[in-house]
Amino acid sequence: MSNAVAEILLDKSNKRIQHKIGAESERLVCDASGKVLRYQPHLKTLLEELVQKKGWETSYQENSNILGLKRGSDYISLEPGAQLEISGAPQDHLFLVREKESEIEEEILSTQAAQDWSWLWLGLNPYDSVEDIQIIPSTRYQIMTRYYPAHSKRGLDMMRLTAGFHLNLDYYEPEEACEMLRAGLFLTPFVVALFCNSPFYHSQQAPSLSERTMIWKDNDSLRSGILDFVFHSDFQLMDYVNFVCSTPLMYFMDEQGHAQPAEGRCLTDLSLDLQKTNALPALREIFTEARIKPCCVELRSFDQQKPNERYAAMAFAIGLVYDLENRSYLNKEALRFSPDQLRKWIEDSARFAMKHDETYQMIQNLFQRSYEGLKRRGFGEEELLKPVEKLISQRKSPAELLLESKTFEDLK
C-alpha cells in the first residue's frame, strides 16, 4: 500500500467543506457538413487562437502541440480522439454550472477557428471507426493505445469514439467519500436507463440504446465497471487506496515528468519518490463508473446529452447523492444486490432503457426522492428535473426519442 495515495485522499487542505458542484463535459465537435473534427488541423488551431486572443494559458503541451488550456479555475482539454472537454470552476449550484459552461461554449464558437462548428450531443461518434481517427499527440495516450489491445476488447473505441460528462461532488470525511462512491455505483443502471443517448455506431443503428455503456463494459476489467469490495458492509477508504495501489498502471511519470509504459508495475513497485509523483496519475488511471479523487467523488456513467437533459441528469444525481437522507437510502439499497446483479442491470439498461418494470419503478422512486432532496438544498434546482419527468412519463430514453425522429442519414 502506498502512503502517497492515502495522503492525497485524506489531506483536508484539498477539501471544500461546502459541497460545490464540478462538471467535466466532453463533446464531439462537427463542421457545417456534420463531419466530426480532428486535432489536426481543427482543434489545434482553436486552442492556439484561445491562447493568442482570448486570454487562456497553456496547461498541457507536448512539443509544439497545445493539448490543454486553463484560465483561472476553468479548463479546456482534449480526450484521446479529440473530443473537446470543458470543465468550469466548481460552483455552489447547478444554475451557476450551466452559466459557466454556456459562457465557455459561446466563447469557443465565437472564435475564427470555430466558425460554422457545432456540438454533436451524442455519447458516441456515430460516423467514424477507430481506424478513421488518429490519436492526439500525447505520449500518455500513445502508451494507452499500445496497452489496450492486450487488455480490453473495446478500449480503443472508448478512447477515440465515446463522449460523456462527469459530475464531481465534494466530500470532506473519508466515510462520506465511501458513502458517495457506493451510492454513485449503485445509481449506474438507473442513470444509464434514463439517459441512453448513443444509438448509432459505425454509420448505422447500434445494437444498444447506449452503445457507449457497452463499450465501457468491454473496457479493461482491472480498472473499469463496478468495484466488488465497495458493496461489502465494512468498506472503508483504505480499501479503495489499496485497490488503486495494487492495480497495474498503464503508464507512470518518470523523474523528468515524462510518461513511460508501466509494463505491469503497480504504484507500489515504484521507488518511494516516484510513488509520490505518481499517486495522482494512479488515481486518474481508474475508470470505474464512479471513482474517488482528491477533492471529490466523480460520477462517470452519463452518455453526453443535449444541455437541458445534461443538467437534468446532473440534478437527478445531486438530489440523491448530496442529500443525507437519500444517500443513506441508496447505501442501504446497494447492499441488497451483488455486484454481478448490478453489472447485469447496467447491461440491460443500456439495451432496453426503462422497458423492464423493476428498472422503471425504481427510477420513479428515485425521481421523487431526488426532487425532495433538491428542494432541501434550497437552490431551486428541482426545476431542472423537468426533462427527467418527461422522459419518465413517456418511458423513453433520449436515444429512443432520437430513433423515432431520425434515421442515421438524418443525422448528417
Image (cartoon, grey):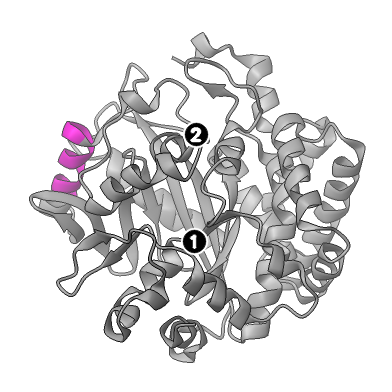
Magenta-drawn segment:
40-50
Expressed as whole percent of the image width and height from the top left, the position of residue 163 reads: 47, 40
Q: Residues within 10 Å of mark 1 (few under 14, many from 20)?
A: many
Viewer-side residue, 201 vs 218: 218
* Residue 276 seen in this snapshot: yes
| Callout 2 secondary element | loop
Asked whether, in this view, residue 117 is left or right of residue 217, the answer is: left
- Does residue 46 show up magenta in the picture? yes
**Residue at image coords 72%, 44%:** 346
Amino acid bearing label 1: Ile
Q: CA distance from mark 2 to mark 1?
A: 25 Å
Vertical order, 17 against 159 (above or below): below
Viewer-side residue, 155 vs 124: 155
Q: Quadrant of residue 150?
A: top left
Vertical order, 350 against 325 (above or below): above
Name the residue tied to disc 1: 286
Viewer-side residue, 376 vs 120: 120
Name the residue tied to disc 2: 121
Expressed as whole percent of the image width and height from the top left, the position of residue 251 reads: 32, 60
Expressed as whole percent of the image width and height from the top left, the position of residue 365 reads: 88, 53
Amino acid bearing label 2: Trp
Viewer-side residue, 337 vs 10: 337
Quadrant housing the C terminus: top left
Helix, strand or loop: magenta stretch: helix
* Residue 79 seen in this snapshot: no
Label ID, residue 140: none
- Does residue 376 show up magenta in the picture? no
